[in-house]
Each structure stands twice: as structure tokens, then as C-alpha cells.
Amino acid sequence: MTWHHLKTFLWLRWRLVLNHSRRHGAVSLALFFIFKIVFALSALAALIIGFLLGATSLPNRPPEVAMLTFAGVIVAYLFFTVIGIMVELQRAEMLSLDKFMHLPMTLSGAFLINYLGSSMNLSALVFFSGMLGLSLGLSIESDGAAAFILPLFVVVFFLMMTALIYQFRGWLASMLANPRRRQTMIVIITMAFLLVMMSPSLPGIVSMYRHKADADTNAPAVTVNAGDKSVDLQARRNQRRQPMTPEEVFKLQSRARFASAILPPGWLAYGVVNTLEGRIIPALACFFGMGLIGAWSLRRSYQTTLRLYRGEFSAGHGSKQRAASQVQARPRTRPVNGRRAHAGLRLPWVPERAYAVSVASFRYLLRIPEMKLTLLSPLIMLLVFGGMSGSGKAEIAEYPGALRALGFAALMLLMSILYLQTNQFAYDRSGFRAFVLSPASRRDVLLGKNLAFFPFGAGLMVLAIGLCQWLAPLRPDHLAAVSLQIIPIFLWFCVAGNAMSIYLPLVVKPGTAMPATGQSLKLLLRFLATLASLVPLVLLALPLGIEYLMHLMAWGEGFPTFLVLVLIQTALMIWLYLIILDRQAEWLHRREQEILAVVTTKAE
């Protein structure tokens, strides 16, 4: 492939992306150009900042400081890279071999363009520019071989990392080819990613709990007033702000040097510190080690592409399908007993058709990977935030404790199922047509959809309240009131979710919760609508605030004002929800054709 061919294909790729953005409207096209400008300015700013830091600050410090700086940038780069892989979970191919191999282009040329295209993303270019600026700044103040080899370290490091990431994406693409395996793999990979991201904080959380348990055991039973408590908290903060001792700094540098020496992503930092210290042999070992790993990974990826082009991955696939088609389905031998099926059950005060819609939607939510992915992150974040906020168990008063439990409950619903609730018809896809054509009224459809989400949302909020109760026990009446407020919180999010599902439906990619491209305006409007829906949640804290004011004025001591007001608030919210549901049913009836056109659109 000549340079002229390469420029032609790059121009073709640019035109395809530009036409794709233009097809989705002027707003999408404007956002496309804004993103490209921000893309270039971010890379330029990272280059300048890195150069100034490397030329002015790092030369006056010990070489270990440069090592720690590069190590920190590498950790940040790996974090954003893993997030990018989690978002796509597939190889980002610029050119399809089936469509382009009939053109005057070699297989190696297509492989090269696909490799470069998958590596040219915002995080990679920003971090590459920043590290290159750091190395160039250090090179100015260095002499001899260090001035020449430091920028090459950055280049060969990104060669290794991009090659490994490209190979890993290829492996993921082959593993996710099977739709059933894809769902399981997405959940497993996401769980592994969250556990890896949490692993650095787990020892701190465990030690914090042990320290708190020892303090509670050994502390004398004395009464501490608010002034002494604030002084004690300030003393703890001042103790944490004290600079590290020389022994602690040496221990940190030794651990960072050891980790950089044994982990290939840390060879860049290890090579930089050895180069600055004048030890050329370890530095060259890191340089050639990264180069060999990158070359080996590219070779493996090219062999995979070659086998894919030859059809070796699909060899025998047809015979397996023919053999599977010859297997006759065995008849169901277990007779159906006379007991009523699960769909025949009834909930009190719920119409039969609404209950049927809720059962069908609930069973579907149990199966789709989007719900599994949605439930993973809040569970783990609940543990982390709960552990962080639980460091001062005895330092939380009863009213702030109740407010914290209420806030955690709302946060769990916001972080978990709200995104699915605000686009609830999109995951039905063609199944939404069955709801439209069914004899169920539009009110029953919306009510059934909302009931299907209730077990997930209520379960997460109960876990959040239970964790807060374990960390800082609430009064029995406060615990009952906060637990009862699960209902108004959920109903308000149902109202907001129904409105956004009707007026702002999104096309989502199959198997993921990610929206398809070209919906920038809708995403912006949904973001603003979500922020607006959070404002009325402040009213949920009104009963607690009224009881607090009565407590300050010594009115109604011993009377559960918070609980009584929450009972009234819950009844009012149920009444308001039923009224709004009738109006939203009319909205759904008017816009069901537009919603059906959106949810049945194939994501690009």
C-alpha cells in the first residue's frame, strides 16, 4: 500500500464520520467539531504542561521524584484506558476486511490502519502528549545518552501498551461473538474491573474498621459535648495533614521502584529513573523489553487478523449448525399441575393487566445484562462510601444521621436503575409493539413497568439504609420513617422516568446500556431533565426538618413527628402519582408511534 492509498483511506474514514454526524442534525455536527477542537487543545495543553514540569520542576528534584511522577501518570492512563475498554467491550475496527480487501490494499495495510485507528483516542493522545512533554523537558536538562533516550522511552511504552490493548480487544471480540456468552462475559469483566479498582482501598477500609473497633473497646464511657468533639476532629485532621517523615518517603520510593521493576507498565518509570541515575544497562533492558512485548503483541494480532481473513475462525461452524439442526427437541415430559402459574397471581389493588405487564417486564429485567451491570456499581460504591463515612460512628447526631440515611437511599436509586427507568421502553425493542397492541390500557402499561423496577430499587435502598443503621444506629421512629420514605422516593423517580421515556427515548446498543451515536441533543436534554427532577427531592427532608425545629423549640418532645409527617407525605405522593399516571398514559398514547420507531431502530 502506497502513501497515496493511505491518505485516501484516511480521507474516506473522515468523510464517513463527518457524514454520520451530519445525518443526525446540525447540533450533532457542531458537537462533533467542538469535540475535535477540544481534542486537539487538550493534547497541546498536556504537551506544554508536561514540558514545563519536566524542564523546571523535576530537574531540581531527586530522580525518584521523576519516577513517581511517571508512575502516577501511568496509573491514570491505565485507569482511563480500562474505562474505554469497558465502554466498548469490542475491537474498534476502522475498516472492515470484507468491504475493503477488494480494493488496492494489502492485508498488512488494513491491519495498520485498524491498529492506528483503535489507538487514536482522547485519553491515549492526551497522556502520550503529557508524557512526551515530560521526557522532552527532562532531556533539556540532561546530557549524554539520557537526552536522546528519554523521549524514545515514551514512544516504545505506548507502542507496547497500544499493541497489548489492540490484542486484548481482539480477544474480547472473539469471546463476545456468542450472544449468550457475551452477556456473561460483560458481567464478569465489569465485576473484575470494579474489584480491581477497589482493591487499593480495601486495606484502608479494613484497617479503619479495626481502628474504630479498638477505639470503641478501649475508650472510657464518658460524655463528650459538641465543642470537645469538634476540637478532637480538628486535631485528627491536623495530624493527617502532617508531612511524611523521611523514613516513610524512603519506604514509598522503595515500593514504587520494586513495583515498577516487576510490572511491564512500570518499565517506563523504572527506565527513566535508571537513565537519570546513569545506569544504562537496566534502562536499555526496560527499553528493549517494552519493544519486544509490543512487537510480539502486534505479530499475534496480525496473525489473528490473517486467520480471520482466511476464514479459519468460521471453519466447521456450518457443520456444527447442521448437526445442531438435526437434533430434535424433546417434548416436555413434566405435566403441568393444577396449581396456578406465577402469572396467575394477583397483587392487591393492582389491575390484572398491569400485574401481567409487571411480571413480564420483571422477568425480562432479570435476564438482560444491562440490569446486571447497573446493579453492580452501586453495590460496590455503597461499600466504599459507607466505609468512608463510617469512620466517625459516634460523631454523628441523630438528625444528621437520619438525613444521611435518606440521602444514601436516594443516591442508590439515582446511581442504579434511574438510567434504565428513564429509557424503559428501549430495552423492550420490538417487544414494545406487543404492549402497544395488547388490550392493556396505557395506564396499565406504565404502572406495570414501574412495578417491575420496584424490587430492584427498593432492595438497593433497603441495603443503603441498613448500612447507615449499622454504622450509626438511628432512633426506632427515625428508622421507620426513613424506611417508609422509600415509597415516595421511588414514585417520584417513576414519574420522572415515565416522562423521559415518553418524550426523550434513546436508541441503545444491544447488550449494553450505552446509547447509540448521533443523539447528542437528546442526551443533553435528558441530563438537564435529570437535574431538574432532583430538585423536588428536597421536599422529602421537610418532615425531618419540621421535627428538628420542634426539637429546638422544645415542642412535642417524645412525639414521633417525623414518622407521622412521613405517613402523610407517602399518602400524598401515592395520590399525586396516580393522578400524574393518568396524564402520562395520554402522553404515551399520543407518542407511541414515535417511541416504537425509536426503540426498534438498529443501533449503529
Image: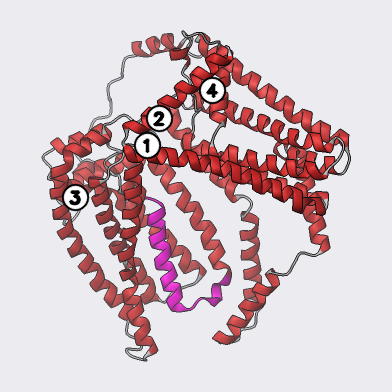
Residue at label 4?
114
Q: Is residue 353 visible?
A: no
Sooner in the amino-acid sequence: mark 2 or mark 4: 2
Residue 223 in picture, x, y percent from top left: 57, 87
Q: Secondary structure at mark 2?
A: helix
Residue 18 got which mark?
Answer: 2
Residue 388 vs residue 347, the one in the foreground = 388
Residue at label 1?
29
Q: CA distance from mark 2 to mark 1?
A: 8 Å
Q: Residue at x 17, y 55 (%)?
A: 581
Residue 30 in picture, x, y percent from top left: 38, 40
Residue at label 3?
346
Q: Which residues are magenta?
A: 392-417
Report whether 40 appears left or right of 583.
right
The answer to whether marks 2 and 4 mark residues whose Cβ atoms lie closer than 8 Å is no
Question: Which quarter of the figure has residue 140?
Answer: top right
Q: Nearer the viewer, mark 2 or mark 4?
A: 2
**Mark 2 residue type:** Leu
